[in-house]
Image (cartoon, rainbow, N blue to C red):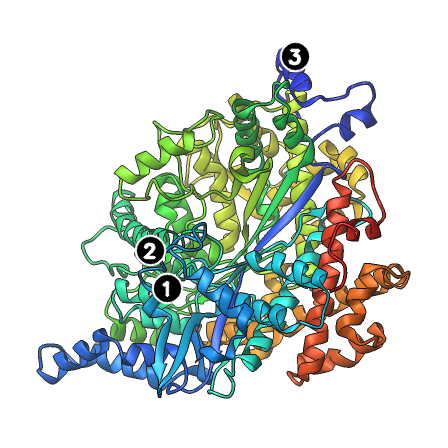
Amino acid sequence: MKRAPVHTDGISSWDRMLEIDRTSMDRFVQSLPFVPEDAAAGVENELSAAVAGQKHSVDLPIIIQDSSFYRNLRKRVDTEESTEKPFLKLRAFLDESNEAVWENSWVRFPLRCLNAYAQTVLYTDMLADKRIPDGPFRADMDRYFFDEKGEKWVRIPVSYLIKLALAQYIGQTKHSTVSLRIFGEAMLSHFLCDNTSPETFSFYPAPMNLENGMGRAAAQETLLRHLLTHLLVVYGNHHFMLQHHGQKAQICLAPNPPQRLIALNEIIPDAFYRQLFMNPCLSGWDRGESKQDYMHVCHRVLSRSQLNAVSKLRDAGIIQSNLVVLPNLSNVSLANNGTHVSISSRKLHQLYRDSGKAFNAVEEKRFGDLIIKIYEHFLPLFVNTYSAAPYRLGFEQFHPEKVLGFLPHELDFTHLRMLWRRWKKKAKLKIFGFPMTPMGPEWLDALIARVCGLKGDLIPDFRLIDYLVALLSTNESPALDGSIGNDIRLKRDLTEQGIFDSRMALYLFYRMRQADVHGFCGFEGRYYSLFPSLLQDMGPAVSLQTLITALAAKYIVQGDVTHASIPDLPFVESERRQITFGAAIGIPTFFIKIDSPNVFLQNILKEVRRTRFSTRYPGYIRVHQQEYKLALVRILREDAADLIELMHMQAEIEALEQRILDAPGMAASKKLIRGILTHAGATDPFRVESRDFNTAAESYYRNVLSKEHLLEAMHVLRECVRLFEPIWNQGGSWRTILNAFSKSRPLMLFLEEVDGDLLNERLVYEDLDVLIGLLILVIGFLKHQSEQSFRETPSDPEEGMQRLPKAA
């Protein structure tokens, strides 16, 4: 890529600050941050939870029927104060559960099912402030306990069930070693009770080195954590007598809000929605009620924000009449689930900690914001290629005030109009060659769609459209100009506009992780939706994320890109982000201003083929999405050739190009769509009604893809045992722990035997205990190895065990 003129003073200042070694090309590359041996990855996963069972046994329908809202609604119908339509819709929701599955329901069981240790964990988490052990309990404690036939029961969300199941396992392994308990107790805090869905985060940072396969190590840790989470749910179903009482908790990776949740949200008020579905934050925070209040703020703000977006659509000229379908006052966008991958640099963190160095908070911010601005230009390489969230929209749903979601807060009006016009052209909305959007009345829109054969659209990654992922800066407050406090100033501006709340974290595709706040220097990628395969899709994606971050650092220290190269203007910010949003929708082209002040983007466009001047938009260049992505690959091969060689990523770059060229079976969106259609018994997504397609997707994620992820996890577990068992067999504390729960069974044979039972849900509980114990041991060993890799002097794994208590 041809570069702008370089200012040597800038180069030398970054050289001094980041201790860049220019004595040779090899040393220069190896001295950059985010290279192998320097980088590590941590992952946070948002899971989809559900409870299977009949309505008289499952918590969600019971709570709805026992609610004052339900009674009042029924009373108003009986007294003819209200039409019976809302009540009938709510009754239909309760009576017509698909497959008897209740998404995001809580579970309920007798308190006596919990052993002493699990009860201690439960009552500790019920404290108003966990830092005060003898302090008062939460004010809302009566939500979680009730009497059933003279016996005390507990009701909790599935996210907290997972943590309690691990506590139950720890409490029941009295015969085991103290060391195994220590490993298990260290894992408890990694199961969060946050937002709507269960969340888990890495037990240890995965070292990004050649030995571990770069991003593959992060995928392996995620798989082992996901397998343990699944097993703990199975463990809880049995030990907490959920199945005995007609309930079966389930978890899986699924990106979009469930269809039934969306339908219920159209019936109930926003306060009742928060009561039913916003997590109480029992785990993960010292003051859970304060965090719960914060999550309620998030829901209220996002609901209000989408409503405020309607006026922006009118200002942009997209809504041209007073006839609109107002978005619901309750928004389900927080029920979207994704994967967040954080990349850290050991070098940057060490430089930051050294008070004698020049790399302080001011320089960290200046460096970090520029990394983000550069990185955002490469985001289209990830969307649909590595992760996706396929979703069908029917014609009747194509109201701009509904489908454009939060985009009015994320794009400049010019790009928003361009995107909406291209989206209508792409979707199946045309009558006599002209795109048409729905009129408003449901019966009329259904008639038009049926008579005219209007099918709507299939969006490859709807999560990135349905969720607020990247707020647009204002003219007064740029978010990424490299100045301390710029995010606070922007949030203040957006709060005054009714778009956001200053108490919330600023939403960005790629977010800085600051040393003083998060304990490490790095960046968090928040644009990943669902990976069809964690080894084949997530692993390469994390490697590519590391490569591009390192390349951005290289551009900066070489002086190739400065903050002036990418001006901090809302239009410039929107110009580069429209490409990513267009990729998520599946729009094949986008438009860039000929005289765009974004020098970095202009240099990229010089590498793009098949561009032409736009006839519709004078002064703009028309660019094909696929050609833009291929140009980015060519830039990586040229500008990051040394980094690609250092990271051994030649094969990954070749595979990336094939994904972009739509090679069969490679792009994530295509793999997921094919799996959904096969599961639905269809061959064409437009021959399936939109609701049926989306429901089939949920069933596919829950019943098919989840098993494929478990198979991958079992493969990783067998590989770990094969590598580690020779070390364990040498004796010492590791072997002692292993013998305590495995009863000296041959591990590889055991894993082969339980493989099928795990997938077919026939796992006997003795084997379940062994499998959970083995996972805790393997993860503990990997955590120890991770810690060793970040020390200056490597030591034998057994040495680390000497610092742990010996077998009781």
Which residue: 68% across, 84% down? 764
Q: Which of marks 1 and 3 is nearer the N terminus?
A: 3
How many other residues sit within 10 Å of disc 1, few (<14), some (14-19) or many (≥20)?
A: few
**Residue indicated by mark 2:** 296
Regarding mark 1 in the picture, which secondary structure is present there?
A: loop
On screen, residue 643 above or below 805? above
* Residue 45 visible in this rendered orientation of the protein: no
* Residue 226 visible in this rendered orientation of the protein: yes
Rendered image: mark on residue 432: 1
- Say which of marks 1 and 2 sits in front: 2
Amino acid at dot 1: Phe
| Residue 292 vs residue 198, the one in the foreground | 292
The count of marks equals 3
Q: Estimate the spatial distance between the alpha carbons at disc 3 and disc 2, rounded to whole Å.
A: 50 Å
Regarding mark 3 in the picture, which secondary structure is present there?
A: helix
Q: Estimate the spatial distance between the alpha carbons at disc 1 and disc 2, rounded to whole Å.
A: 47 Å
Residue 113 point in image, percent of width and height: 51, 79
Q: Earlier in the sequence, mark 1 or mark 2?
A: 2
| Residue 685 vs residue 116, the one in the foreground | 116
Q: Earlier in the sequence, mark 3 or mark 2?
A: 3
Whether label 1 touches label 3, CB < 8 Å: no
Q: Estimate the spatial distance between the alpha carbons at disc 1 and disc 3, rounded to whole Å.
A: 60 Å
On screen, residue 535 above or below 208? below
Amino acid at dot 3: Thr
Q: Is residue 343 left or right of residue 104?
A: right
Amino acid at dot 2: His
- Say which of marks 1 and 3 sits in front: 3
The quadrant holding residue 423 is bottom left
Rendered image: mark on residue 8: 3
Which residue: 61% across, 21% down? 355
